[in-house]
Image: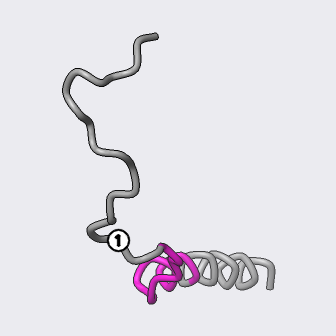
Amino acid sequence: MAISRIIASITQYISEAAMRIFGPTDDAYPATGMQPFAGEPYKKGTADNW
């Protein structure tokens, strides 16, 4: 009886890992691509002096 419970728990552990690896992704990353430039262009000779 105890051996069958141990085998069942090991089987469940391995099957849950396989489902996690080979299942659909659950990532919620935003779509990436070209981003518009929102800053000021660099003008040669007008850089701030620190």
- Residue 11 within the magenta-colored segment of the rendering: no
The location of residue 15, given as percent across then percent down, is 54, 84
Task: Count every numbered label the image shows and give the total.
Answer: 1
Give the camera-side residue of 15 and 5: 15
Residue at position x 47%, y 80% in the image: 18
Q: Quadrant of residue 48?
A: top left
Q: Is residue 42 above or below residue 8?
A: above
Q: Amino acid at mark 1?
A: Thr
Q: Which residue is mark 1?
A: 32
Report the residue that reaches farthest toward the right.
Answer: 1
- Residue 19 within the magenta-colored segment of the rendering: yes
The residue segment tinted magenta is 16-29
Residue at position x 22%, y 21% in the image: 45
The location of residue 14, given as percent across then percent down, is 54, 76
**Mark 1 nearby-residue class (10 Å; few <14, some 14–19, many ≥20):** few
* SS state under label 1: loop
Q: Is residue 34 above or below residue 9?
A: above
The location of residue 26, given as percent across then percent down, is 53, 82
Residue at position x 80%, y 85% in the image: 1
Which color scheme does this rendered protein use? one colour
Give the camera-side residue of 12 and 44: 44
Q: Is residue 46 above or below residue 6?
A: above
Side of 45 where 28 appears, left or right: right
Side of 35 where 11 appears, left or right: right
Report the residue that reaches farthest toward the top.
Answer: 50
Q: Is residue 28 above or below residue 40?
A: below
Report the residue that reaches farthest toward the front.
Answer: 46
Report the residue that reaches farthest toward the left.
Answer: 44
Q: Quadrant of residue 35?
A: bottom left
